[in-house]
Image: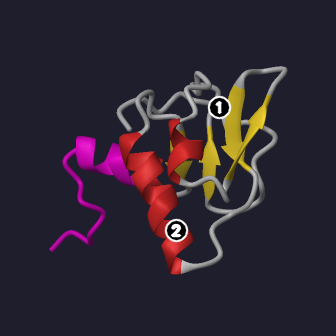
Amino acid sequence: MEDHDGQRLPNNAAGKYFTTEECDGCAYCAAVAPENFDFDKPTNTYFIGKQPETPEEEEMVIEAMDDCPVDAIRREGDVMREILVEDGDNGRPKE
């Protein structure tokens, strides 16, 4: 997840996981977590159709997120955490 500019796609189910406009429709996510990703044919993009409901589903969504070739799958809160780390702040209180 190197890029922080991707806009959240509107079709994503409400919740902490989502896909962004950076999705190129490669279908990797749907192959890894078919219960959670759906395809939007007009835009040729995948989106979170159902948020993970079990630890197994969450594990598969995280795998899809970690291995997405275009970094189009995100988790709320991760972008801010990455920005803090890039700025040399690990998010912990200063001593």
Question: Relative to residue 49, is residue 25 depicted above or below?
Answer: above
Q: Which residue is mark 2?
A: 58
Q: Which mark is residue 50?
A: none
Task: Count residues near mark 2 (Cα–Cα under 10 Å), then give few for <14, some for 14-19, many for 20+.
Answer: some
Q: Residue 71's spot in the image, x, y percent?
A: 44, 34
Q: Quadrant of the C terminus?
A: bottom left
Q: Residue 76's spot in the image, x, y percent?
A: 56, 56
Question: Relative to residue 82, is residue 92 depicted above or below?
Answer: below
Q: Are marks 1 and 2 in contact (CB under 8 Å)?
A: no
- Residue drawn at the location 50% of the way across and 74% of the way down: 56
Between residues 82 and 42, which one lies in front from this camera angle? 42
Q: Residue 83's spot in the image, x, y percent?
A: 36, 44
Residue at disc 1, secondary structure: loop
Magenta range is: 81-95
| Extreme-left residue of the structure | 95
- Residue drawn at the location 44% of the way across and 58% of the way down: 62
Question: Relative to residue 88, is residue 95 depicted above or below?
Answer: below
On whether residue 89 falls in the magenta region, the answer is yes
Residue at disc 2, secondary structure: helix
Q: Which amino acid type is shown beneath numbered disc 2?
A: Glu
- Residue drawn at the location 38% of the way across and 38% of the way down: 1
Query: Which image quadrant for residue 11?
Result: top right
On whether residue 64 falls in the magenta region, the answer is no
Residues under labels 1 and 2: Cα distance? 22 Å
Task: Count residues near mark 1 (Cα–Cα under 10 Å), then give few for <14, some for 14-19, many for 20+.
Answer: few
Q: Which residue is mark 1?
A: 7
Q: Which amino acid type is shown beneath numbered disc 1?
A: Gln
Between residues 46 and 30, which one lies in front from this camera angle? 30
Of callouts 1 and 2, the N-terminal one: 1
Drawn side of residue 50 relative to residue 85, left or right: right
